[in-house]
Image (cartoon, rainbow, N blue to C red):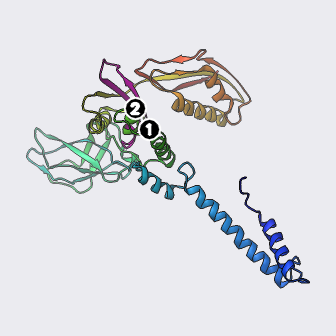
Amino acid sequence: MPFERPTLPQLIDQGASEIESRLPGVLARVRRSLVGVINRVVAGGLSALYKYVEFLNRQVWPDQAEAEFLVEHGNRWGVFRVPAAPATGIVSFTGTDGTIIPATTVVQRADGTRYLTDAIATIAAGAALVPVTAEVAGQAGNSALATAVSLVSPIAGVNSAAAASTALAGGADIEDVEPWRARILARIRQAPQGGSIDDYIAWALKVPGVTRAWVYPGELGAGTVTIRFTRDDDASPIPDAGEVATVQDYIDLLRPVTADVLVVAPIALPLNFTIQLTPNTPPVKAAVEAELADLIRREGEPGGTLLLSHLREAISIAAGETNHVLTVPNADVAHTVAQIPTMGVITWA
C-alpha cells in the first residue's frame, strides 16, 4: 500500500488528538490557546520535513532529479554534461609585408565579442590568414563568413580592420539539462556494447553542439557505418565541414578498429507550407510557426517521413488557432537517407 503524506490540516488534527488524549481537559483545538499554537507550530514543522523528504526522494531518480543532483547520477554512469565550446575559424589580416602578428592578439566584432589568435603570423603578399578562437566559450561566438572584426590594440604595420575568411563556427553553449538527463537515462537503459547503434549515437551527442544523431550501418558496404547529425541550436542545424570533422575525429577515437566510419552532414530539404488560418493574426501565425518548427525538430530525420496528420495536428494545437486549411503539403513528406527536413517558408493563404 503506498504511503500518503498527511496534509497540514491532518497533522494539526493528529497533534491535537494526541495532546488531548494525554492531557485531558486541555483545549488543543482552540486557535488562541498556548497548546493550540504550539500544536500548529509543530505540525507546520512536520509538514516542511515531509516536503523535504519528498524532495530528497525525487533526487534519487535521474528522471526526476534537479540539475544539481543530476551531477551525481551523471558521474555514477560516466555521462558528463557536455561543456560549452568556443567558436574557431580563420581571420584575414592585411598590412605591410614582414609585420608579425603575435599569438593571443585580440580582435573583436562590432558587438564586443572577442577572439584570440592561436599562433604567430607574418604578413606576406599583403595579407595573413590566422586561426582564431573565441575568448568566451558559447554559441554567441559563432559568426558568418566575412564577418568584420577589428584589432583591440593597434599593431604597427597591420590594418585594424580584418574579416573572417571562414565561418567562425563550432561554438556551443553548455548542454541543457534535459538533453543531458536523456543521455543519462539512455546510458542506464542501453548498456555500451563496443560499437552498437546506440553507442555511436551516444558518442556523437558527447560533442559540444550536437543535438541529434542517426546511424546507418552498412550504407556504403559491409563494415561501414555512416553517421549524420545536426546542431539545432545554431543558426543553421546543418553542420559545416569543420564541425563534421570534429565529430569524425572524436568518434575515430572510440569506434571499433575494424569499423569504417564516415561522419557526414545531412542535406537540408526546406519544407514549405501554404496555410489558410483562422484567426489570421500575427500572434497565432507565430504560434503555428513555432509548433511546426518543433515538430520538424522532433520527428524529422534522414530517411524518415513527416506525416501529414502530424503536421495538421501541430497547427491545430497552436495557441489561439480555431481552424485552418493546410494545402501545401497535401501528403506525407518522405526524405531520402541523405536528406533532413528543415523549416521552410509559410505562405498564409
Specify the label residue 211 is tagged with.
Answer: 1
Q: Is residue 99 above or below residue 204?
A: below
Q: Residue 110 lies in magenta, yes or no?
A: no
Q: Residue 228 lies in magenta, yes or no?
A: yes
Q: Is residue 196 above or below residue 112?
A: above
Kindly state the secondary structure of the residue where label 2 is placed.
Answer: strand
**Residue that protrudes farthest toward the front in the picture:** 1
Instruction: Point out residue 261 in the picture as x, y percentages from the top left corner.
Output: 29, 28
Q: Is residue 217 left or right of residue 161?
A: right
Sequence-first disc among 1 and 2: 1
In depth, the one of 260 and 250 nearer the eye is: 260
**Residue that protrudes farthest toward the top in the picture:** 331
Specify the label residue 88 is tagged with.
Answer: none
Kindly state the secondary structure of the residue where label 1 is placed.
Answer: loop
Specify the label residue 229 is tagged with.
Answer: 2
**Residue that protrudes farthest toward the left in the picture:** 98
Q: Residues within 10 Å of mark 1 (few under 14, many from 20)?
A: some
For the record, the magenta segment spans: 204-232
Q: Is residue 171 above or below residue 226?
A: below
Q: Tell me if label 1 and label 2 are in contact, CB under 8 Å.
A: yes
Looking at the image, which residue is at 58% across and 61% down? 56
Instruction: Point out residue 116 in the picture as x, y percentages from the top left corner.
Output: 25, 52
Tell me the amino acid under the disc marked 1.
Thr
Looking at the image, which residue is at 40% across and 32% down? 229
Looking at the image, which residue is at 75% across and 72% down? 43
**Residue that protrudes farthest toward the right in the picture:** 25
In depth, the one of 211 and 169 nearer the eye is: 211
